[in-house]
Image (cartoon, coloured by chain):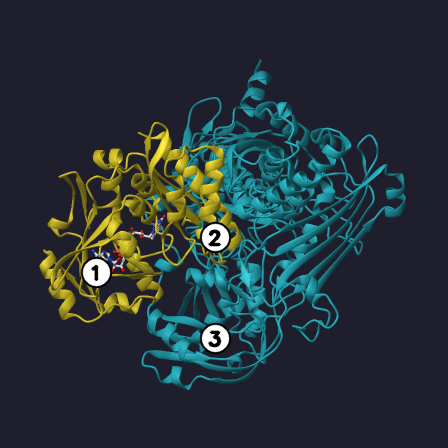
Chain colours: A yellow, B cyan
Amino acid sequence: MTELNTVEYIAVKSVAEAVTALQSHKGARVIMGGTDLMVGMRDGRIRPSCLVDVSRVRELIGIANHHGSLRIGAATKITDIIEHPVVRQACPALVDAGKLLGGWQIQNMATLAGNVCNASPAAETAGPLLVLDAEVEACGPSGLRSIPVHQFWLGPGKTALEPTEILTAIIIPPGVDGRRSAYQRVHIRHSVDIALVCSAARVVLADGNVQEARIALGAVAPTPIRVREAESYLQGRALSEEVLDKVAELAQAATQPITDVRASAEYRRAMAGVLVRRVLQSAARRA
Amino acid sequence: MADAVAVTSQIRKRKSVGQPLPQIDSAEKVKGLTQYLQDLSVPGMLYGAIVRSAIPHGLIREIDTSRAERLSGVRAVITARDCPGVLFGPQEPQDWEILCRNKVRYIGDEVAAVAAISPDVAKEAAALVRVEYQELPAVYDPFEALKPGAPVLWEQHPDNVAYRFHIERGDLEAGFARADDVFEHDFYTGRFYHGQMEPMGCIVQYHADGGYTIWTPTHLPFRSRMTYSKGLGVSMDKIRIVVPPFGGSFGMKYELNINCIAALLSKKSRRPVKIFFEREEDIGAGHPRMGLHFHYRLGVTRDGRFVAKEARVVGTGGARTFWTPPVLSTACYRIDSLYHFQNVRTEGFLVYTNQSPATCFRGFGNAEALTALETFIDEIGERTGIDPVELRRMNGVKAGDVSLHGWRIASCGLRECLDRAESVSGFRNRKPPPKIPPRRGVVRGIGLAAGHHISGNRIIINEYDGASAQVRLGFDGQVAVIVGEPDIGQGMNTVFAQIAAEVLDVDPASVRSLPIDTLVSPHGVGTLGSRGTTVAGRAVQLAAEDARTKLVSLAAELLGVPPQEIRLQSGSAVVASGGGSLSMAELGREYATRYGGAFLIGHGHFTPPTEIPDATKYGNLSTSYVFGTHVAEVEVDTETGATRVVRYWALHDSGTIINPSTATGQVHGGVAQGIASALLEEVLVKDGRVTNPNFLDYRIPGFQDIPEMYVEFVETKDPYGPFGAKSIGESSLNPTAAAVCNAIYNAVGVRVHQTPVTPERLWKLLETARTEARKKE
Ligand SMILES: Cc1cc2nc3c(=O)[nH]c(=O)nc-3n(C[C@H](O)[C@H](O)[C@H](O)COP(=O)(O)OP(=O)(O)OC[C@H]3O[C@@H](n4cnc5c(N)ncnc54)[C@H](O)[C@@H]3O)c2cc1C
């Protein structure tokens, strides 16, 4: 707890100010809702020299829908995301995930950016963002850049961001049809828990056949993953029992789960198959 | 005519007993005003931290405290050298040391301690203490520990058996010979943490006369004083224990070594010292319910009579002995007072292992035994084709019965509970379980289990069973109840107030129970064994009756009428025939004025009809016995193994219900905890280290895990407790896990033999059953 009392804290008003603060304080960390960061600091796992609070930066708050793309500002709270009518219509998978993220109190504090930057292999929103082909917008000393979300996570707790960069928005690009998307997880406790395994899927259907598919899995590898073999296998096929069995098999083959205190690798692998079937069916029933 | 009036006034409706009053302190609690231990501080107070063993088993070679001592802000560092060096403890075998002398026996064992000006400095200092060990092989599994050649934890116990239980009654072989069928059953109930909101803690102040004041929430202020007195080497009267409001316990806060550690830190630093656990410490190095293995063999006649039962019970006690010996014995033989088994033999083993010492938990071994037994009876019902509820009716005890071991069942609502449970829940119309678990889909099932418990226990302290109380009226008109048993958060002070208020006909909300302080409270056995309402409550009733007699004669004298003319009514003494009355405030002031400020005090004491069991363990153990039946309806996801309890019914015979609201609260909490023990909670240990010492991976239930419950009380008439009240604290939890396990069976057709039934565990059982079915095809 010592660190909490002595750490420097800067509340910034703009992205530019935030970048400057990160540049001038070695070992500084961005703080949003703090629902990961404060827990890590209390445990002594994270020891930042300085906290740069961007949670009240105006330009980072809010959801904008223009030119067919959806831009979710980094400081937007999970509650505001899951209650947003456009998000609910265009990205139901993200809403499924947001509703499972912690409880109401956590959803009122936590941000999508925090969930993404924390880079947990079990992060609730990772799968939905993967299947929505989301892009991460980041700003650093040399300006803005965009990173496809599937290239963003490098390992548990590791992202493609530079220490002086901040995530400014998550963007669902134009042309991504997310209406038939879904997310589910396997957990032990029904009230607030962490995913043992989670999965998201998105399909675009034409005449009952899959035109385009995205499948993602979490907590079965060092980062959230996409199951490309299954995605291409699905192309042009109807979601019959046999096809779903095959997809489940491909999904299981793509996993590299570990055994830990929460679940065995064997169970995780099996559940990956179960969940992939379920999210595909659930996604297909939507719209 | 006159007679008839007198009779009606005597059986006037109860005003206070039976009312669903809110707990007296609930407004304070809800507003956050209650001062729990963590809110308290004593001027000059330091903070203690414990240096814990990092290895599961080893000899201590050297302890270097010099760096810790040099850290600024550190006021005392202690090791075994500062301890009196006697072995002591709450139960036999006594194996507590305060701080480890030569050897550590679990990861977390207490090796040294520091006191410093802040919790952070104390923690930092504790980390600076260097301990050199010579590691020894360790053993975690009790069956491994029982094998010859296993690592030995205590030289005095080369077989690693801390305590052995044996009971035998009737003729077991003859019983089995009479049986038409013999069934066997194994069950394991896992290590289960209390999950109480407030972790363990205490403040201890050393005094110039060599004594100590201890502020700590404890069920057993008087009994624990005996334990600490031996450990600290001071006489009992030199230890004063003050009990602040409880932040939960469920059995965790009986007697704890931290009180002695803080005492020695205070003695060395000459400052009061607070020790307050972090959650990781409370789970990781704390004292959960022990894991218990049950093996049963039961002989049954063709028509369903139980005629012989053989059992073996093995408990994973951990490295030292807390309250586990009586828990083990309870797990071994209390069920013999629920059903007539006729001929029994039970062997129990409490085994030393290299884990943190376990202790008691609400249900006290009986919840675990009932989990094993009630799942077994469900299975026997199915295998014999006799309805499992009928089996329970046929073999269950009745009012007036004396159990095999001499327990006298004065009242028993078991059958009423079974009948009502069947009719309110629809259990009778249940579908049979599937032959093979379905591959996909969510299926429903319903399960029933019965249970029972005691209301007080003779052998908590040797000297006596019972309780005493005073009910007093003061100058200010305040009616107060004085007992020796602390309210542990379950609402006993409210119940005491209702009992006293009923007798005196005053407003229960105006009656206060005084806080417990061993310097001023009467000696009490403690709040445990579901004895508070029944035993202490009865003493309160008697004390109130004595106060009533005294009040009546005072009022009679003041009002100039004979005592028979006086009635206590709505807070006043009134002349029955009209003409004159005095309020409680007036009576209190008058009495105090006459006698130099004295309280008018009613005294009451109650000695229950219990007996110390003889050498064969025969003798009536408890004041009264309570019964219940639970029904759970579950949904099982057959692909993931996840179970959700969707509906629940709890029927209880707890005698007269003094407060339906607090009693129902006990059932809600007991069932929630029981569901958690069935589905969610287990302290996981790998190589002696707890791998889930936090509320992320140690999952206590939330609202989504607990269904709405139907609660009904079947009120029997018991002759002993106040107004016929029996207990509810533990019986509310006892049948739950078995009801859930039986419901799972009904849903999927697979028997579970271990709790908690986590999704992965059930999934494995389902997979095995499906694979076997496929092979057979
Ligand atoms: C009780 C509880 C339950 C939870 N349940 C879940 C759950 O079910 N599922 C789940 O996935 N998570 C869960 N979490 C974890 C956490 O709430 C989420 O990951 C949340 O989305 C984090 O968001 P935040 O805004 O609080 O992030 P913070 O804690 O503020 O930050 C998290 C990390 O991201 C970095 N960061 C934040 N914003 C930026 C930015 N703009 N640029 C660069 N770096 C940034 C921070 O430096 C930090 O390392 C739970 C946490 C708690 C305490």
Q: Position of residue B356 (x, y in %)?
A: 56, 65
Which secondary structure, mark 3? helix
Residue drawn at 18 percent across, 62 percent down: A165
Q: Chain of mark 3?
A: B
Dot 2: within a 10 Å radius of its alpha carbon, few (fewer than 14), some, or many (20 or more) residues?
many
- Residue picked out by circle 2: B195
Mark toward the start of the polypeptide (3 vs 2): 2
| Residue B562 locus on image (x, y percent) | 53, 30
Q: Quadrant of ligand 1?
A: bottom left
Residue type at mark 3: give it: Leu
Q: CA distance from mark 2 to mark 1?
A: 34 Å
Q: Which mark is residue B264?
A: 3
Residue at 65%, 63% (x, y): give it: B141
**Disc 2 residue type?**
Gly
Residue that carries the numbered disc 1 in the rendered image? A30
Q: CA distance from mark 3 to mark 1?
A: 45 Å
Q: Nearer the viewer, mark 2 or mark 1?
A: 1
Q: Is mark 1 within 8 Å of ligand 1?
A: yes
User: Looking at the image, which residue is at 56% across and 20% down?
Assistant: B8
